[in-house]
Amino acid sequence: MTQARTAIAQAKFLAAFAQRGVVRHAAVVAEVTRFSVYAWIRDDPAFKEKFDEAREDAIDRLELEARRRAEDGWLEEVHQGGKLVGHIRRYDGALMALLLKGRRGDIFRERVSSEIDARVRAETNPLSWTDRELEDKILAEAVAITTRRQVVEPRS
């Protein structure tokens, strides 16, 4: 690809990417492969900078749409008896929660606490068993499986 054609393809890609934020879609619009795009990002610092800006533009567009759906909502038709009788405004509370978590995570984040007991007891650590202990445990498990099978599948 010539330098001029590459510049045109890059401009088309960046415009489409800024709109949707999807590399595959923008590559199709620009009539190039994703591999070409990733090579440009890797090899051309100026293109990488423009790519990062286009990604930020795409993210800003998504955030604006999420905010619109959360704050302004949208109208849905209400039908009764097969006829349109009005509209109802719907809002997306889940998007509002995500926006709040993103912007005010210190206040709206999930508060989860977990503790892990990382102690390994010798009796439950197979690496510490002797050959005899391992054989005993395998035999005990085989007996337990056979017993369960007999309960589930009684013999005639």
Image (cartoon, grey):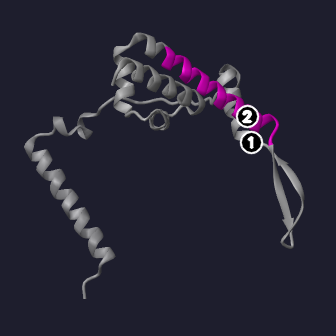
* On screen, residue 79 above or below 110: below
Query: At 45% across and 38% down in the image, what residue appears?
Result: 28
Magenta residues (range):
50-73
- The residue at 74%/42% (across/down) is 92
Q: Does the stretch in magenta take in 5?
A: no
Whether pointer 1 and pointer 2 mark residues with C-beta atoms closer than 8 Å, the reply is: yes
Q: Amino acid at mark 2?
A: Met
Please give the label number shown on residue 96.
2
Residue in front for this viewpoint, 37 or 3: 3
In percent of width and height, residue 99 lies at 69, 29
**Where does label 1 land, which residue?**
92
Disc 1 crowd, CA 10 A, few/some/many (<14, 14-19, 20+): some
Quadrant where the image shows the N terminus: top left
Instruction: For mark 1, give the secondary structure.
Output: loop
Is 95 situated left or right of 154 in this image? Answer: right
- Image point 30% across, 78% down: which residue? 153
Report the front residue among 71 and 21.
21
